């Protein structure tokens, strides 16, 4: 044992003898074969626990380093982590002196671990590079038990992967440091969709022996969380190997506080992640002697016996292990061709594989060509078929069986020939074999067979169609994921327009694919293959792309939504709707719903563009309004036509997220700034980089050009608290403006470029003189948010954005949920507007006309306000996630918005102002009169509208009331209506007399009408109201049930009920029995005549907001705030069923929120419920039958026709839904 290890044992001996129990620790050490049964007996013979511990330590001191490691691991396993920590620094390094087990053979344990972990097998010919292998081992040991990163870096083809795999072929290393196993994933160059596929495959592999089958994660964040839990709970103390990493953002998906080894060409690749970091540099090529050794092993000769051409061959291969191996494999089969192969490499001028190829080896394509030429003719054709395989994809054997129409064994024999000649790689992961080409080989094949690629793609598509005919692959099949991910790729490569359109425009294919991998990959394919899909007309492709884009948040749900029902919500002219209608008509046993009034819902945006693969943080118009520039989380700058969305320019502009972009006044340049701390200037026509500025020390949040043409000035601001002014004709910053105490989030030139305004998280807005860079004014916005008893310093206000008026006299500032307008000269507050009580403002922009202000809100919408009248004039909905930016065109006729949903939307200002903000309140009443559906709704807070649900037309509308209307009801004969107002007033309308208000009850003293539940008896003309009463201190006191005579408003009956918040009440059809539910989750059944409680039902765990009787008066349904619905037997009070989805995504409430309303079908066999959306249930089984997802959420009620075929509701966006059962 090392002296250092002995020292740590002796130094901590007292603590060890005092605490450890030897029995289980010795079991581990015997299993590791470092302790004998005789030695165990000696320990057991000691009389006390302390003496037994002392004897065990004495025995360990006489042994080697393996005993120390085993004892340390046993302490960890048995929970003695504090004691193990005392010994950690004494752990001896893994010895590399005895390489026999590593080089010449492996224990069965190592073979099992590496096979299960997907570690590549050792090449047929392998030359030792022990110094590098030992270096990798040593760095892995340095990780200890702490999370961290080991980076093995060097040029492509230098052997990083082989060396890393070899370092893992060490029994002691795996046993001592990674007892949880190793898990290898080949990453390569990926976009987000490709990375998601890699993560899904890794999670699937790690979960293979799980008793519970889980769906693949649907996005990278979900995959990261799944992987973190697996590594923490199931594979603790395991090693994750990420092979061939290109981009630092990829590592963020694996930054889960685990132990990771990566291979990469970029030494700085781990700068973006946290944890301990270690590096191993692999030289760019083999030493000359190592190259000769590889050749000697291939031809089975001693190095001294190699012909003189060998030295020349190694030099021509430039030290590349891959190229030397290719030549060596050829010489093994044709040992007399040394001179021939040397001449081929020296004299034949091969065309470079591809100019944009990231591999840069002089001899690569030469060696590849020679290797392929030596195959017999049949094998050449098979190898040529591999030209159309996707990059960085391991292809299951089954795919090639379908391609070649052969049995598995035949295919494996052919592929093994390629593997033996180093022309193909095999991953034997478990029972199945997966094959892949190195990128170098694939690039070569693609270039060599470029003129035949279309036919090759066509062949694999035809073979797929022949094999599957009219069926589709299912998830249990080995080749399933390959076809769902790459069938469209092959069809596009074959230019099979009809087949690709049939595939991509099929709801069956969309359903199958999105269930497996989510919608992101499909949306990517619509963009990627648009040139093929749009050869006739782009409309259908746009229909499907928008359908997926707008429903992507639903297609990620569990349980998976009915895609036919989602399709039925599309416009009737959409191909998606027409296909869904045909499916619905053919389906038996499932009912579907038609949204009959959806045509009244107009999309107010003029153009929707999805230019990015991630969140869009900023977008802006060029001065001529012809172009739009956008940037975002995918690190790209995009320039496209404002009229059509046609892409003009795409630039991979930065190394991290791009936070802002701006056109110069003449449109010649575009500036970008990024979280990578850099500011870059680009030619907006060619994409050429003009300047790179790197003087900020933190992320740069905003960049803005001056407004006048001729002089190019750029202002930038950063988290380093500085604003910098740049002259594009100079290399360095012209002025640095210092004064803010915290991050500066936004900056903007005044209209005449005299000043620069800046906004900061320190709660201030500052004005700086452009010429000198001096601060001229400072406005402390925090002062306008503090309460009377607060100091300004105690208030945290993040000032996000500012915008100048056209003449520069005023400046608009955004903070929290307020718009504040200041006079620039005096710094006085001119006016302020609280835009929303429920969301924050992300961005604002003054319209060039000065009256309108656009604000982007965190709740996915945009609002337009008239700053003169302080009124909201438009409400723009359409984005599915946070809106980061809103910007007017130079003439104000258009404005654009950008969002986390990856879209940029262009809106027409006049169109939006005319038709927006026409929303209904959630409270409404519906009467189904003969075949008519009549709806009484509250319009814009102060009006009542009578709407025909059949024609979606407004029949009547009242004048504006003096107080907002809170609720309303409609008589069944359509003659009368009643409504309650927030001031406590109740009013009655005679609808047949031109909506004349003829009756009014007096306001309730010290009360506020929160809700009214009304039931109108046809004959008695009596209304029942439930009022929520408050005392002076706003403490809920009691609830009063009032019965009012219709014509004179006289109170017939008044009854105090609960002492807690009553949420809902419902009468039976004969009005003799009343159900009420309350905040305390108790349900009471009342006799109305005697005012006594008949039954009290308990069982809900949350507030019960709704309840209803079945028509046969035998059942009662109740719903609560947890999304739980219960079916009760009224006579016995027994719980019959609990209605809830089988599986729900983590964090997703069961019903999308509270259950707010319930209604039985006439035969009492079905139940419909409202909440976050609408659901239909089988009352007998409690199973979900159908779900209708509304555009908004938080539905307050559902009104159902007597025949249970028409349903009416309103969502929180004010959208009315009249649904007809098909």
Image (cartoon, rainbow, N blue to C red):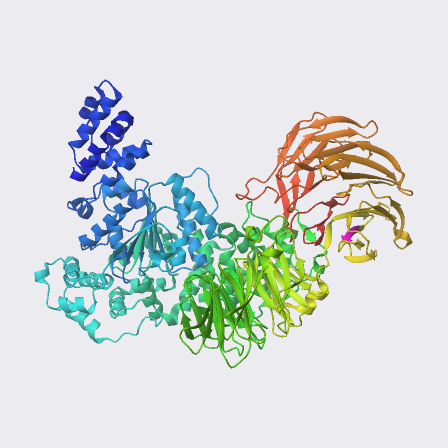
Toward the bottom, the furthest residue is 710
Q: The N terminus lies in which quarter of the figure?
A: top left
Toward the top, the furthest residue is 47
Q: Visible in this render: residue 879?
A: no
Q: What main secondary structure does the magenta stretch of the protein show?
A: strand
Q: Which residues are magenta?
A: 934-938
Image point 39% across, 52% down: which residue?
398
Side of 376 where 1144 appears, left or right: right
Q: Position of residue 77 (x, y in %)?
A: 31, 33
Q: Is residue 622 depicted above or below 1102 in this figure?
A: below
Q: Nearer the viewer, residue 885 or 825?
A: 825
Q: Nearer the viewer, residue 328 or 107?
A: 107
Number of marks drawn: 0
Toward the left, the furthest residue is 304
Q: Is residue 619 depicted above or below 395 in this figure?
A: below
Q: Position of residue 1217 (x, y in %)?
A: 71, 52
Side of 642 where 977 appears, left or right: right
Q: Position of residue 590 (x, y in %)?
A: 64, 46
Q: Position of residue 1175 (x, y in %)?
A: 65, 44
Image point 8% across, 62% down: which residue?
305
Q: Nearer the viewer, residue 1220 or 231?
A: 231
Q: Nearer the viewer, residue 10 or 52?
A: 10
Side of 378 where 574 appears, left or right: right
Q: Assess whether residue 1218 is covered by the magenta stretch.
A: no
Q: Visible in this render: residue 915?
A: yes
Image point 34% across, 68% down: which residue?
357
């Amino acid at each position: 044992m090392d002296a250092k290890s002995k020292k740590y044992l002796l130094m901590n001996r007292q603590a060890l003898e005092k605490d450890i129990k030897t029995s289980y620790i010795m079991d581990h050490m015997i299993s590791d074969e470092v302790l004998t049964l005789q030695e165990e007996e000696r320990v057991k013979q000691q009389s006390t626990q302390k003496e037994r511990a002392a004897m065990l330590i004495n025995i360990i001191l006489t042994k080697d380093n393996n005993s120390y490691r085993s004892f340390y691991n046993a302490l960890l396993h048995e929970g003695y982590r504090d004691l193990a920590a005392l010994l950690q620094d004494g752990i001896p390094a893994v010895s590399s002196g005895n390489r026999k087990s590593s080089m010449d053979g492996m224990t069965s344990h190592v073979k099992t671990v590496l096979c299960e972990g997907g570690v590549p097998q050792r090449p047929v010919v392998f030359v030792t590079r022990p110094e590098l292998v030992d270096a990798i081992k040593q760095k892995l040991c340095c990780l200890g038990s702490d999370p961290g990163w080991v980076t093995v870096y060097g040029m492509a083809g230098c052997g990083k992967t082989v060396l890393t795999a070899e370092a893992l072929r060490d029994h002691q290393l795996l046993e001592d440091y990674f007892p949880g196993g190793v898990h290898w994933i080949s990453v390569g160059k990926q976009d987000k969709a490709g990375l998601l596929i890699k993560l899904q495959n890794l999670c699937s592999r790690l979960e293979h022996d799980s008793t519970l089958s889980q769906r693949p994660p649907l996005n990278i964040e979900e995959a990261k969380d799944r992987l973190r839990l697996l590594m923490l709970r199931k594979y603790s103390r395991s090693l994750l190997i990420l092979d061939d990493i290109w981009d630092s953002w990829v590592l963020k998906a694996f930054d889960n506080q685990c132990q990771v080894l990566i291979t990469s060409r970029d030494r700085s690749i781990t700068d973006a992640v946290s944890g301990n970091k270690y590096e191993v540099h692999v030289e760019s090529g083999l030493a000359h002697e190592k190259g000769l050794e590889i050749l000697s092993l291939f031809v089975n000769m001693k190095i001294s016996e190699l012909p003189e051409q060998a030295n020349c061959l190694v030099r021509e291969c430039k030290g590349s292990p891959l190229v030397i191996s290719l030549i060596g494999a050829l010489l093994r089969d044709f040992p007399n061709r040394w001179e021939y192969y040397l001449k081929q490499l020296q004299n034949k001028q091969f065309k470079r594989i591809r100019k944009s190829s990231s591999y840069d080896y002089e001899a690569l394509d030469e060696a590849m060509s020679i290797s392929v030429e030596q195959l017999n003719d049949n094998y050449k054709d098979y190898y040529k078929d591999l030209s159309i395989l996707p990059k960085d994809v391991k292809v299951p054997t089954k795919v090639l069986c379908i391609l070649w129409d052969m049995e598995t064994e035949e295919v494996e024999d052919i592929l093994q020939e390629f593997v033996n000649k180093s022309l193909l790689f095999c991953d034997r992961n478990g029972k199945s074999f997966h094959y892949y080409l190195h990128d170098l080989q694939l690039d070569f094949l693609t270039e060599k067979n470029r003129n035949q690629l279309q036919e090759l793609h066509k062949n694999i598509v035809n073979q797929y169609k022949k094999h599957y005919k009219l069926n589709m692959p299912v998830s249990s099949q080995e080749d399933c994921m390959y076809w769902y991910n790459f069938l469209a790729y092959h069809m596009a490569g074959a230019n099979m327009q009809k087949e690709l359109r049939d595939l991509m425009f099929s709801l069956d294919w969309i359903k199958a694919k999105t269930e497996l991998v989510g919608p992101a990959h499909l949306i990517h394919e619509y963009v990627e293959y648009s040139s093929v899909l749009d050869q006739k007309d782009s409309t259908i492709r746009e229909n499907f792309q928008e359908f997926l884009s707008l429903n992507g948040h639903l297609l990620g749900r569990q349980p998976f939504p009915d895609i036919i029902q989602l399709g039925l919500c599309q416009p009737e002219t959409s191909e998606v709707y027409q296909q869904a209608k045909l499916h619905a008509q053919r389906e038996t046993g499932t009912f579907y719903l038609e949204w009959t009034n959806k045509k009244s819902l107009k999309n107010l945006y003029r153009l929707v563009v999805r230019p990015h693969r991630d969140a869009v943080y900023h977008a802006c118009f060029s001065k001529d309004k012809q172009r739009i520039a956008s940037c975002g989380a995918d690190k790209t700058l995009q320039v496209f036509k404002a009229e059509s969305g046609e892409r003009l320019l795409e630039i991979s502009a930065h190394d991290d997220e791009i936070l802002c972009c701006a056109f110069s006044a003449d449109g010649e340049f575009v500036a970008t700034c990024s979280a990578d701390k850099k500011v870059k200037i680009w030619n907006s026509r060619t994409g050429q980089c003009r300047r790179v500025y790197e003087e900020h020390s933190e992320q740069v949040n905003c960049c803005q050009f001056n407004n006048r043409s001729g002089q190019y000035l750029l202002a930038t601001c950063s988290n380093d608290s500085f604003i910098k002014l740049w002259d594009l004709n100079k290399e360095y910053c012209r002025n640095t403006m210092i004064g803010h105490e915290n991050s500066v989030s936004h900056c903007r030139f005044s209209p005449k470029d005299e000043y620069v305004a800046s906004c900061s998280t320190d709660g201030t807005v500052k004005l700086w003189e452009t010429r000198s860079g001096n601060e001229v004014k400072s406005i402390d916005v925090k002062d306008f948010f503090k309460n009377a008893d607060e100091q300004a310093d105690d208030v945290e206000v993040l000032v996000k954005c500012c915008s100048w008026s056209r003449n520069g006299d005023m400046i608009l500032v955004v903070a929290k949920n307020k718009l504040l307008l200041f006079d620039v000269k005096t710094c006085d507050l001119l006016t302020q507007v609280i835009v929303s009580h429920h969301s924050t403002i992300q961005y604002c922009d003054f319209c060039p006309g000065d009256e309108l202000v656009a604000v982007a809100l965190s709740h996915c919408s945009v609002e337009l306000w008239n700053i003169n009248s302080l009124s909201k004039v438009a409400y723009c909905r359409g984005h599915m996630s946070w809106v980061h930016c809103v910007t007017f065109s130079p003439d104000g006729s258009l404005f654009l918005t950008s969002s986390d949903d990856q879209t940029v939307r262009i809106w027409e200002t006049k169109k939006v102002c005319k038709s927006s903000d026409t929303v209904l309140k959630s409270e409404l009443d519906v009467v189904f009169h003969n075949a008519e559906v009549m709806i009484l709704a509250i319009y814009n807070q102060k009006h009542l509208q009578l709407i025909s649900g059949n024609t979606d037309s407004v029949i009547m509308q009242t004048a504006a009331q003096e107080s907002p209307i809170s609720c309303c009801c409609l008589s069944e004969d359509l003659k009368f209506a009643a409504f309650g107002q927030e001031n406590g007033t109740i009013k009655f309308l005679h609808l047949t007399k031109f909506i004349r208000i003829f009756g009014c009850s007096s306001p309730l003293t010290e009360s506020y009408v929160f809700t009214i539940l009304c039931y109108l008896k046809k004959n008695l003309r009596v209304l029942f109201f439930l009022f929520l009463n408050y005392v002076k201190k706003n403490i809920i006191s009691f609830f009063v049930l009032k019965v009012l005579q219709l014509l004179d408003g006289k109170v017939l009956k008044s009854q105090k009920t609960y002492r807690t918040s009553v949420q809902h009440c419902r009468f039976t059809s004969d009005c003799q029995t009343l159900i009420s539910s309350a905040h305390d989750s108790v349900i009471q059944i009342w006799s109305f005549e005697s005012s006594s409680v008949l039954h009290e039902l308990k069982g809900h765990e949350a507030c019960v907001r709704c309840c209803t009787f079945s028509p046969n008066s035998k059942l009662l349904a109740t719903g609560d705030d947890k999304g739980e619905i219960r079916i009760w037997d009224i006579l016995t009070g027994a719980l019959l069923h609990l209605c809830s989805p089988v599986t729900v995504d983590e964090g997703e409430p069961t019903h999308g929120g509270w259950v707010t309303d319930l209604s039985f079908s006439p035969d009492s066999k079905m139940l419909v419920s409202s909440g976050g959306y609408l659901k239909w249930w089988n009352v007998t089984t409690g199973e979900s039958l159908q779900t209708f997802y509304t555009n908004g959420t938080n539905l307050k009620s559902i009104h159902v026709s007597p025949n249970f075929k028409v349903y009416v509701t309103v969502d929180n966006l004010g959208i009315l839904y009249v649904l007809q059962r098909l």
